[in-house]
Image (spheres, rainbow, N blue to C red):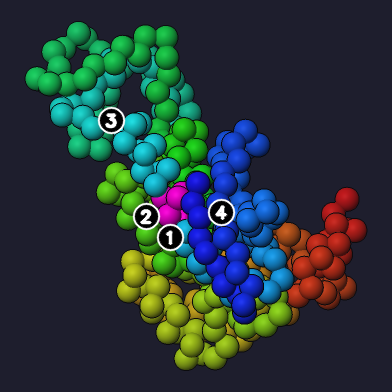
Amino acid sequence: MKSLPIDAGGKKVNATLYAVDGLYFTPAYIWLDDTNNLLAVVGGWSGMVREGFEGSLGALIDQKEQVQSARAGDMAKKLIHHLSGDLVIKNVTVFDSLNANKVPGQRVTVRDERIVSVEAESGQPSSAGAQVIDGTGKMLLPGLWDMHQHVFPDLAVFDVASGITTARDLANSIEDLGKLKKHIEQGEQIGPRIVLAGFIDGPGPYEGPVKVLAATPEEARRRVDDYAKLGYVQIKIYSSVKPELVPVIIDEAHKLGLRVSGHVPSGMIAEQRDGADEIQHMNFVFLNFMPDVTETHARPLHRAGKARRGH
């Protein structure tokens, strides 16, 4: 696949990246050394590397991401179909999601990535150059929205394959997500439209995997402002944010027209999160009824406490 010479404090290894197929829908990537022993497994929010080679993680991740990007690009070239005219789906049953019913015998016309008409089928002529699909016996649904996702390059194509055309990303690396969104929009990768939500956590032993942290009101406002400038439409508050910073984040976000969602930070209960637009994860609502569950920072203990009452 791809080889990379590594020198870690005098320990020289020729690392080779292998893609293992057949275990999952996408390849599993592993780095092996010259003797075909495991050196590292990296990617996403976690990974492992042989002791002493921690300083090589960045290079190993970069090389693996290049291979993944090339694979996604090849897939896009093979599977993306560029229309020269309208797309017309005739004689199809349309699912009306607003009224929860089926409308048979419809003609749907798509032009430049937008639905321009939904009308009864009457054999009307199509525009010149249109691609016409006969939908007899089939049902056409609106594109689905996934409202809580962490979109990664290897998995984005499966959203489209599952009918998900828009995904709200609720915590990801600013750089990585921006790159992925750009690749999708430019047709270099298959994936959904991405709605951006900006992650904010507080520093500490349980801080989240996306290292956008705020410990003071000034830092909190700056983080919100930075996300707004990047085109984010929402802020996601995580578990280690200080309770006194929650209203600061909510106020700044709402001033800029951003929604606020996320967790209920340690030291708070759901009803104290006044002003937030939504809460992710029902377990944070459970805490309203469990005042004696105090291990709200240590996640395993926290979950165990809720599980004891969840039955």
Quarter residue 50 falls in: bottom right
Q: Amino acid at mark 3?
A: His
Q: Are marks 2 and 1 in contact (CB under 8 Å)?
A: yes
The part of the chain drawn in magenta is 64-69
Q: Are marks 4 and 3 in contact (CB under 8 Å)?
A: no
Residue corresponding to mark 2: 181
Residue 81, labelled with which disc? 3
- Closer to the N terminus: mark 4 or mark 2? 4
> In the image, which is nearer the foreground, mark 1 or mark 4?
4
Q: Amino acid at mark 2?
A: Lys
Residue corresponding to mark 4: 16
Quarter residue 191 falls in: top left
Q: Amino acid at mark 4?
A: Thr
Query: Within the magenta stretch, is there residue 65?
Result: yes
Describe the element under mark 1 as helix, strand or loop.
Answer: helix
- Closer to the N terminus: mark 3 or mark 2? 3
User: Percent position (x, y) of residue 97?
Assistant: 44, 32
Cα–Cα span, label 4 and label 3: 35 Å
Residue corresponding to mark 1: 177
Q: Callout 2 environment at 10 Å: few (<14), some (14 to 19), or many (20+)?
A: many
- Closer to the N terminus: mark 3 or mark 1? 3
Residue 103, labelled with which disc? none
